[in-house]
Amino acid sequence: MASLVWDYVFCLLPSVLLLLVSLGLRWPRVRCWTRLAVSAAGWRLWVLICLILELPLDKNIRPWNEEAGSPGEYILPGSGQASGGPRLICKPTALAKYLLRHCGSLAWPRLASWPRGDPHLQTLSSLLWGQHGDTLQFTRENLLLRDGGIVALDWAMGTRLGEFGGRKRWEGRKEHSSGGNALGCFTTTPPVLLLIPESWGGMTPHLKVLCHQAVRQGFNVVVFHTRGTAGCPLTTVRLTEFGDPADLEQVVAYVHSRHPSSVMVAASEGSGSGTLLSYLGESGSSSCLKAAAAISPVLQGQLWFETAMPPVYRWRALIHRKLQLSRYESSLRGVLDVDRALSCSSLRDFEETLSCSSAPRPPKTSLNSGPSSGSDSPRGLAPSVVWALGERAYPAKDWDNYWERNEPLRDADEVAVPVLCIRSRDDPLLPPATTLPLPLFQSNPYFLLVLTDRGGHCGFTLEGPKETEEGRTGNESEEEGCNWSHIAVLEYFRVVADFLKGEEKDGEYIQAGQRSRTSNMAPSRRRRANMMRRQRLQPTEERSGDEEDGNFTWKRSYTR
């Protein structure tokens, strides 16, 4: 009989324990202790995983650390304020002040905390999976370049479910979700958004989500794929160098010719910013773009290649690039040291082997070898193409010479388009935030930097449901996407379009520049090997008098 009683007790014991746990969790203090215990255990497990995978870990993001400060504070140079949230680092121009007044998405979001806010989890999420991206449909267009190469343009045509489509989608969403007019108010036609993926090619889920949100807001979205990436055929032996804007220049001209009356803007993610920033510097005021944005940008290409990257990310990028190279191994073996490149264990060695002439190579040939590919023409290019490409028709002499012509900020002084850079301090793929060229943003009126404490690489996940300033609920915000960078970039384009529209309409001259530029004079072309090697900036206190005397206009010259 006693054994039977004990059998009943043991059978009911799990149910009794579950009942006691459920009753205990009803008390706020017990819930708080339980949450802290689970978070602490999860944090210690995550620390162990990071140690095994050799991932850098910031101990300041421990889940039981309470954060102080308001997430909506910003810092302008010389303001002397402190901030616990995103910081806008820029020259205090009329555009910067206009953005602070009208771009609400820069102020209201609160980025997710651990574990969703962990930099590595956010980075892997942006690279491996996303939200809404797979519902988009694209149509591909191959563009023939002047040297015989081909690049691919993927035009977003809407979603598979038919939620949005063509002109009806645009006309039905004339008002922007944040309460202001959409970017199309700048013209009578939908704006065009040109997206530039990572330098190793392909569309990440992060970029697909941005495409989805842009399509919902009425943009004509086109994604630019460099030669030999994302299924684009490689028809020449000339590979695209990091920061080479020659192909992008032709793409921008082509897209503008198809939509001549539309506002054209561009956005890049990660290392794709090298091409975008190089294009803006080389094109200057003749660029067809009205504004540009770079999410987690590589601002200093040489430093990025020479900085050690965590093994998980380094090997992923290397394997991806080696697979692309092996696809054309037999065709490129005549002009490149393919075997050496495939055996490289770092991104720097891989890039140097493919792009610099210092590496030993077999005799030059071309993919389409024939009588026309003489020995006088490098890489089998026609003389007219060699003349058009200039020094880029020849491989770089060495690693330093490679960056003299490819550093993204080499012509930063010539940029005549507002550029918004969004960067997090905990980005595991980029060099430390202490290496950022802050003097550039503090002195150049066209460069703006939004620096956050969290976000990872192309992550910037929002914390959760939150009531916004415009009265939208967090559920509506999450329905559009959970990436704050996407929301901020799209609203930035709208605000800049409104600002430039007012400037061109009124013809006002804005007091906000160290250098004096006028609308009837094109800026002089002062080429520099590397903009970051030559500092001409003065302390903020010494520049205050120049800012008061200098006249600056946002009206651009197209005389170049």
Image (cartoon, rainbow, N blue to C red):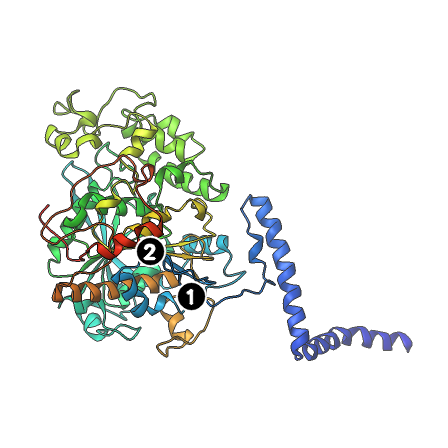
Q: Which image quarter holds the C terminus?
A: top left
Neighbor class of circle 2 (other Cα within 10 Å; few <14, some 14-19, many 20+) is many
Check disc 1 and give the amino acid type.
Answer: Glu
Residue 293 can be seen in this image? no
Looking at the image, residue 145 lies above or below residue 155? above
* Residue in the foreground of this view, choosing between 545 and 222: 545
* Residue in the foreground of this view, choosing between 519 and 286: 519
* Picture residue at 17% right of the left edge, 20% below the top: 375
Proximity of marks 2 and 1: CB atoms separated by less than 8 Å: no
Q: How many marks?
A: 2
Neighbor class of circle 1 (other Cα within 10 Å; few <14, some 14-19, many 20+) is some
**Residue under label 2:** 90
Check disc 2 and give the amino acid type.
Answer: Cys
* Residue in the foreground of this view, choosing between 546 and 102: 546
* Picture residue at 13% right of the left edge, 38% below the top: 146
Structural distance between the alpha carbons of marks 2 and 1 = 14 Å
Where disc 1 sits, the SS reads loop
Q: Earlier in the sequence, mark 2 or mark 1?
A: 1
Where disc 2 sits, the SS reads loop
Q: Which mark is residue 311?
A: none
Quarter of the rendering containing residue 137: bottom left
Looking at the image, residue 283 lies above or below residue 484? above
Q: Which mark is residue 73?
A: 1
* Residue in the foreground of this view, choosing between 560 and 196: 560
Quarter of the rendering containing residue 83: bottom left
* Picture residue at 26% right of the left edge, 45% below the top: 412
**Residue 194 locus on image (x, y percent):** 24, 55
Q: Which image quarter holds the N terminus?
A: bottom right
Quarter of the rendering containing residue 325: top left
